[in-house]
Amino acid sequence: MTKRALILGAKSAIAEAVARQLSESGWDLILAARQPAALEPFAADVQLRSGQRVDLFTFDALDTDAHAALPEKLRAQCGNFQLVVLVFGYLGDQEKATSNTAEMERIMSTNYTSAAVILSYLANYLQTLDQPCGIIGIASVAGDRGRQSNYFYGSAKGALALFLQGLRNRLSPTQVHVLTVKPGFVDTPMTAEMEGLFLVAPPQRVARDILRAYEKRKNVLYTPWFWRYIMLVIRSIPERVFKKLKL
């Protein structure tokens, strides 16, 4: 039986690494992005190297009015799919967002609202297949505790993690498994200009961790693994102390 994975936000470095890992494991792919034509060289390379089918699909995360019809449109154009990997996100400009409504809304809408809407409809679709399926949502360690340096982004990713937890609970009696991924710092264009980063992981390592965790049907993945313990320490700092820290 054909295995097909839908990757939402397929232009990111993590998405490309996940796509390669999936194709090498025998998955056909649907790469969805706002400008899919830009993915044509990458798609051709993946298809040539793996021999797997790769389709491109136009997807605008912020066009939530179109999300309800998206599962059926995808099925009609590309065929059934059993795995959804939601990778899109927007770090944004924290300082700008404190006084710019458009930037504030873009950060919140991209990282949470649009993700929750599309995953709701895709979860409904996967349930109808009556076969083992999965949803992988990329949240962030930034969502584990609010910090002055990125609390717009962090709060949206934290909300996404909470949404995925609820979705996992709702779907637990079904054949649809939900994995929440919380990466630390990853070497991507989005983080290239950020200062003071440490323990930065290559996207290929993150992708391997994600697929391994999905195959083992884990519920939550911190990647690389040590971020689970780093965030445990950060979450345990008393608020009276934490609020005085420059993080």
Image (spheres, grey):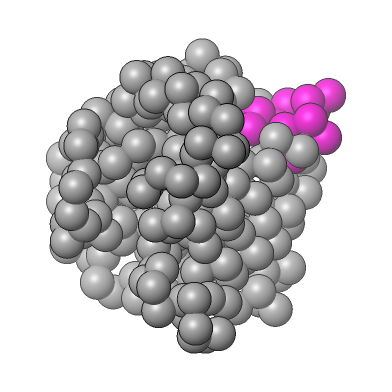
- Residue 212, horizontal then vertical, whole percent: 40, 19
| Residue 178 point in image, percent of width and height | 63, 32
Q: Is residue 169 above or below residue 163?
A: above
Front residue of 148 and 160: 148
Residue sitting nearer the eye, 81 or 21: 21
| 163 versus 105 height, above or below | above
**Image point 41% across, 68% down: which residue?**
94
Q: Is residue 29 visible?
A: no
Vertical position of residue 44 compared to residue 33: above or below: above
Q: Is residue 189 visible?
A: yes
Q: Residue 239: horizontal and vertical position, in percent?
A: 59, 37
Q: How many marks?
A: 0
Q: Position of residue 101 (x, y in %)?
A: 55, 85
- Dividing the picture into quadrants, the one containing residue 220 is top right
Q: Name the residue: 45% across, 56% down.
A: 148
In the foreground, 202 or 7: 202
Residue name at image x 70 percent, y 61 percent = 117
Q: Say whether residue 178 is magenta.
A: yes
Question: In the visual, does 245 lie left or right of 47?
Answer: right
Residue sticking out furthest to the top: 216
Task: Examine the image and state in which quarter residue 175 appears.
Answer: top right
| Residue drawn at point x = 58 percent, y = 54 percent | 155
Query: Image check: 166 left or right of 31?
Result: right
Magenta span contains residue 72 = no
The magenta segment is 167-181
